[in-house]
Image (cartoon, rainbow, N blue to C red):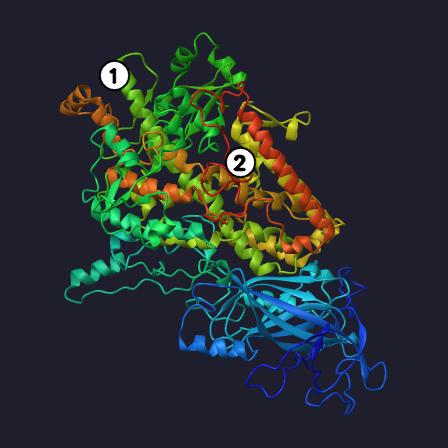
Amino acid sequence: MLKAPVNHVNGHQRSSPPLLSRGKKAFVVGDGGVDVSGIPASFLSHNTLAFPVQRHSRSFRSRRHSGKLVGEIKAVSGEASTAGVITTTSVKAVVTVQMTVGGVLSNLSITRAFDDIGDLLGKSLLLELVSAEVDPVTGITKPTIKDYAHRLGRKADDLQYLAEFEVPEDFGSIGAIYIQNEHHKEMFVESILLEGLAIGPVTVTCESWIQSKREKNSKRIFFLDKVACLPKDTPSGLKALREKELAILRGDGVSDGPRKKIDRIYDYDVYNDLGDPDKDPELARPVLGGKQHPYPRRCKTGRARTKSEHDGCCLTSLLNTIANADPLSETRSSDVYLPRDEAFSEIKNLSFSFKTVYSVLHAVVPSLETTLIDKDLGFPYFTAIDSLFNEGVNLPQIDSKGPLGSVLPRILKAFEDAQNNILLFETPEMIDRDKFGWMRDEEFCRQTLAGLNPLSIRLVTEWPMMSKLDPEVYGPAESAITTEIVEEEIRGFCTLDEALKNKKLFVLDYHDIFLPYVNKVRDIKTMRTTLYGSRTLMFLTPTGTLRPLAIELVRPPGDGKPQWKQAFTPCWDATGAWLWKLAKVHALAHDSGYHQLVSHWLRTHACTEPYIIATNRQLSKMHPIYNLLHPHFRYTMEINGLAREALINSNGTIEACFSPGKYSIEMSSVAYDLQWRFDHEALPADLIARGMAVEDPDSPHGLKLTIEDYPYANDALVLWDIIKDWVTNYVNHYYKEENLVESDEELQAWWTEIRTVGHGDKKDEPWWPVLKTPQDLVGIITTIIWVASGHHAAVNFGQYDYAGYIPNRATIARVKMPCEDPTDDEWAAFKRRPEDELLSAFPSQIQASQVMAVLDVLSTHSPDEEYIGQQLELTFEAVPEIKAAYEIFSGKLQELEGIIDGRNADACLRNRNGVGVVPYTLLKPTSGPGVTSMGVPNSISI
């Protein structure tokens, strides 16, 4: 085959690289002759986004001859326009590669030296231009045009490489580019810029790790941003490549086994890697996912199952091993597999958030465990809690002047006059504004509407409140909060019937979800904890604020004891007042646990991972819906992997510091089984389902809120509408006819896989939305984006400011109520020093320090945070209509900033404005770095 050499590109002449006898060439090769004769031949006739090259006549000459046309060179694809001359275009490809830690240019190894020589010789990357069209005569793919890219130099934190091509006229439009990494190390390729096309510069978004050519499947295909299209519109020369790339991402034909770090395979598995029975049988945990414990699926790692070993010294040892063997669980390792492009932690100035979380879980928490030897030691007095903010905790094993100190500057401090480094916490904003706000009942209720977990409060619609649990097992179903108790509390306002009719009663109901675990939790021997089923009843006052009426705590029958339950109310006598304070500690611990396990982890992190897996398995990167969703999935699988490794795993921070202990994540499975519905993850449907809103076409957003001053809902509905408008404009651009949604095979496979595999334990539920029309698609996509952005921001970034002061939102209540079956000595001790009982209920010193450290980093925005509406994706910019729609989207988000500021300044809105009240800013779209209690990132990135 004759090769078309390259010498001049747009007047630029490359000097011959050292050690080479002649300059490098762009050359044309075949691509295996894939038969796609059944595919339409013309890109132009099927896709209006074709890119004509800027053509001009050019003589092809061999570089080895000095200027004379020694002989004719025939065109490889197409006929020459005149003898010896073909029409060509000069195209440059500028490849941007990001400097990394662990990748290209990362060390001084022998392979690095070879790579430097490759750069010097101009053989760093091999690029191939792929025609969007098949040969109209043969129906097979046209030969590609190759060139080696040579290194141009460094630009900021990036390296740039240049390849140059002469593209024959009959090559047609460029649809994709192959990249092969000639280095020995992987490299992270950000993008490719094509210059010289008639329509101007064209970008190819890569954002991907390219492995060395020595690895399998290392030759990568990237489609031009402008060829984003539905499957039916795929250019004929790209259809087979589109399908092949999806097969690679699905792992088709790949045998089971541990996934390698370099793999890009997306597949599903159950949560069978939280326990560690190989280390200790007590660390075994049930598999989450399946009939017994329904759960969303996670990404498959392929690690081996846990072992069944015994010392062989006796029959008892063998029997114990068999009894404790856990063949369904996956072995644990310090390196959790993620598809390579989901793991960005090696990029030099990215993943600040990931590194801070990792550092806390792997360095700070273990240091605390060695420093604070007595894990059950509580705070002896309230000033000891305050000392965490002004004195700190010594951490002798931590070097705050090293890399860890630069990652955790907020909480690690080094003092010249101190022998040890100090874990010193910033004062949370809530306590900074009102140190005693945590004690006030009105603040206790306000936070159900404008605090860390505003997604649990619901309208009371039935009376008396009843449990749905089996009374034969759990005792009488009727609530201990009686009509008499309620009417005593609301006397002077209205009757109970009037309160129910006028929608004045609201509840946090954690009775049925916690009660089955009460006796199990109380039997835990490795930590000091307790649990109740609980209900907290509140009344909507004429001022629009909530007032607590009663807290019910319930213990089911067990150990020969009958059911115990009691309703506690605000009281005006000393004993009743102290019992009320303690009941609030328990109620808040329950709300904290539910918030972290369900509102946060389950409903955002865990439930989003199947969407990510399905998107990569079923939607090509050419698919416009892939491009729409991709920004909202960045970094989520990486942070979820870290959570499984050290946060939600057996003996991890959640189990060690929250009331349910080792049953924590298992309880989230119960919530998934009983409560989770995809259709109710849509904000309006969630509000309606909880009785917090009703449909009203005359009201803003089409909803009338039951509580008008509901800061979370008020701001969230504006954000929801902005997201929905953007998604509507985007979807309508690509799906101009209703039948296009139902006929889109990639889209239908994606939605089917989410329902039947990713959330397969719910596959038979009747509430799944159908996907037949663009309107259906808008609803589904808006819901997914909302969960990953607004919902997650609302429950995550206020964690430190609301829960960083332990008395405000303790994660655990360690002792039972003093009035539950007390001994004479216990009751006497309570009467003598009730403060001791309160301090004993709070987390221990080590639990508090661990939780505060973790919440601090979870609430932190990294300096390179990607906020919603702030980053115009290159794939959006490539299409003028989409770019214009995105600019409208971004503008509306800026308007939301002002709307929220205006609401927080309105003195009539008492749930977000008042003396010592923290303004509600969690849904302000942007933020600076650090702990700010504002800012909505695109994705669940921490």
Residue 110 position (above or below residue 265) = below
Q: Quadrant of residue 95?
A: bottom right
In the picture shown, does residue 636 fall above or below 193? above
Q: Quadrant of residue 237?
A: bottom right
Rendered residue at 48%/48% (across/down): 863
**Which quarter of the picture shows residue 203?**
bottom right
Q: Amino acid at mark 2?
A: Leu
What residue is disc 2 on? 923
Of callouts 1 and 2, the N-terminal one: 1
Comparing 905 with 837, the one in front is 905
Q: In the image, what residue type sits under mark 1? A: Thr
Counting from the top left corner in percent of width and height, residue 738 is at 74, 48
> From the viewer's perspective, is the residue at label 1 or at label 2 nearer?
2
State the residue in front, 840 or 148. Answer: 148
Residue shown at 42% from the left, 32% from the top: 468
Tell me whether circle 1 and circle 2 mark residues in contact (CB < 8 Å).
no
Pointer 1 residue: 575
The residue located at (46%, 79%) in the rendering is 114
Q: Which mark is residue 428?
A: none
Residue 743, horizontal then vertical, whole percent:
71, 56
- The kind of secondary structure element at disc 1 is helix
The percent position of residue 96, horizontal first and vertical second, equals 58, 64
Task: Tell me: residue 331, above or below residue 794.
Answer: below
Q: Quadrant of the N terminus?
A: bottom right
Residue lying at the far top of the rendered structure: 492
Residue drawn at point x = 33 percent, y = 40 percent: 852
